[in-house]
């Protein structure tokens, strides 16, 4: 579903006019949306840029700049022949291909105007007319057309986070905000005319209402950032933010093992980063202690549909589960990830396709199951029963080897069924 390169790919076009960029050498045929890092190469001046899908008439080029030596991630719908279009003011404005989404993301050739101007208070913006209930993240474009100091903030609906940061003068940046079942987000500004456009959405992954602080402790050198991702994660959404106005500095985030060093000024933006999800780490660097990093959610691996799975097939890994559930952090439980490849498996069973996974909370032994299940997500509900209903019992017979069934039934009310939606 989401894939991120270890090292970013430079796709910077010639400057001065709209240029078609063919990405077919880098992304698969089923790509829907690409993730681009836009940054200055150290020129030190305001630079205008525009990004759009191939054939689009959208012309949000002259509305603002990546300020100074700033950076942002921008999400662009690709055409069926895997092309986009870009316009940059000079060759000092760099475009890097960070990754892509497949069936779990949808982009819009013509973005929708969500806010014609933000206000000085946190206001909820309803996206229910544009995105499905399954949406986990909304892909936004923010523009400020006035050359004034402008504090901007964007957060999930219902969040208690109050992070805002200055955009110096006219600004133009991409942003990814977590979305829940309400299909809303909130935004605020204190400055010039600020507009928000919706470029698309991502319908798989885990999104958080409040960010989880993962700031590094040192300055000017890369440090390991430890994550607690759900099984099947392929990328993490990090929000970088300066918590003291006027003290923004250089930041860089990269996949563990990457040689990238996109170390540029940043006051407030989101970064989509591929991670080492065996070690559960990424790497981060900041110029000063005023810059903080927050985990806002996780993106998922691509998947493969299997039309038939033998009962005794256990997939590319042992499908073992151990330990008890914890809903207080980012992970609900620890499931061993595939040893190789980039795919998870979606199975033909209707119950398995719903992501249903049955576990015993009180059993400390490892349960070896005969199916590989879909991804854990944050929309989980625990059900505790005194017995097994017919449908659940039928599922257990088929999904878990009969040698474990007697043990499961013998625990009666201790059984907890975890439904992942």
Image (cartoon, rainbow, N blue to C red):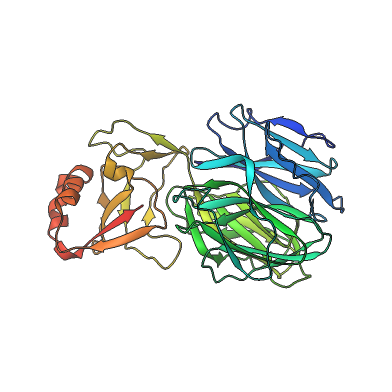
Identified at 19% across, 63% down, the residue is 385
Task: Please tell me in which quadrant of the rendered image residue 290 appears.
Answer: bottom right
Above or below 316: residue 180: below
| Rendering coords of residue 113 (x, y %) | 64, 50
Residue 226 appears in the figure: no
Residue at 76% in and 65% down: 150
Q: Nearer the viewer, residue 232 or 89?
A: 89
| 103 displayed left or right of 176 | left
Nearer to the camera, 92 or 223: 92
Question: Residue 178 occupies which quadrant of the picture?
Answer: bottom right
Task: Examine the rendering and report whether any part of residue 86 can be seen.
Answer: yes
Give the tally of numbered discs: 0
- The percent coordinates of residue 107 (x first, y second) are 58, 41
Query: What residue lies at 30% left-to-right and 36% top-to-bottom?
Result: 348
Front-lying residue, 387 or 5: 387
Residue 261 image position (x, y, % from top left): 72, 50
User: Along the horizontal axis of the image, is 364 left or right of 138?
Assistant: left
Q: Decide if residue 13 is on the left or right side of residue 320.
A: right
> Relative to 7, does residue 167 appear above or below in the rendering?
below
Left or right of 294 in this view: 369: left
**Percent coordinates x, y for residue 325 in the rendering:** 34, 63
294 above or below 253?
below
Asked if residue 332 is positioned above or below residue 111 in the image, the reply reads: below
């Amino acid at each position: 579903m989401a894939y991120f390169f270890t090292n970013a790919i430079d796709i910077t076009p010639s400057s001065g006019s709209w240029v078609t960029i063919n990405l077919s050498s880098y992304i698969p045929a089923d790509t829907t949306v690409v993730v681009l890092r836009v940054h200055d190469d150290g020129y030190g001046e305001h630079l205008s840029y525009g990004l759009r899908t191939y054939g689009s008439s959208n012309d949000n080029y002259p509305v603002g700049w990546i300020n100074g030596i700033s950076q942002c991630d921008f999400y662009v719908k690709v055409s069926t022949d895997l092309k986009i279009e870009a316009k940059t003011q000079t060759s000092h404005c760099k475009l890097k291909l960070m990754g892509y989404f497949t069936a779990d993301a949808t982009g819009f050739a013509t973005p929708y105007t969500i806010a014609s101007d933000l206000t000085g208070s946190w206001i909820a913006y309803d996206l229910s007319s544009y995105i499905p209930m399954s949406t986990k993240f909304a892909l936004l474009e923010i523009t400020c057309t006035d050359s004034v100091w402008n504090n901007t903030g964007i957060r999930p609906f219902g969040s208690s986070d109050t992070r805002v940061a200055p955009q110096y003068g006219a600004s133009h940046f991409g942003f990814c905000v977590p979305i829940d079942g309400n299909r809303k987000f909130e935004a605020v500004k204190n400055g010039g005319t600020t507009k928000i456009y919706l470029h698309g959405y991502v319908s798989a992954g885990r999104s958080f209402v409040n960010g989880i602080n993962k700031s590094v402790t040192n300055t000017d050198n890369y440090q390991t950032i430890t994550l607690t991702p759900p099984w099947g994660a392929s990328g993490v959404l990090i929000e970088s933010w300066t918590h003291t106005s006027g003290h923004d500095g250089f930041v860089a985030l990269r996949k563990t093992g990457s040689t990238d060093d996109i170390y540029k000024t940043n006051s407030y933006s989101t970064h989509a980063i591929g991670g080492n999800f065996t070690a559960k780490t990424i790497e981060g660097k900041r110029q000063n202690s005023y810059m903080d990093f927050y985990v806002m959610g996780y993106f998922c691996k691509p998947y493969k549909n299997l039309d038939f799975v033998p009962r005794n097939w256990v997939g590319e890994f042992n499908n073992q589960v151990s330990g008890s559930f914890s809903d207080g952090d980012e992970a609900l439980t620890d499931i061993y990830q595939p040893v190789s490849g980039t795919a998870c498996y979606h199975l033909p069973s209707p119950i398995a396709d719903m992501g249903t996974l049955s576990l015993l909370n009180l059993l400390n032994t490892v349960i070896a199951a005969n199916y590989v299940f879909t991804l854990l997500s944050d929309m989980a509900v625990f059900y505790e029963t005194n017995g097994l209903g017919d449908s659940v019992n039928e599922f257990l017979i088929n999904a878990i080897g009969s040698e474990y069934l007697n043990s499961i039934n013998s625990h009666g009310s201790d059984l907890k069924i975890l439904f992942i939606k």
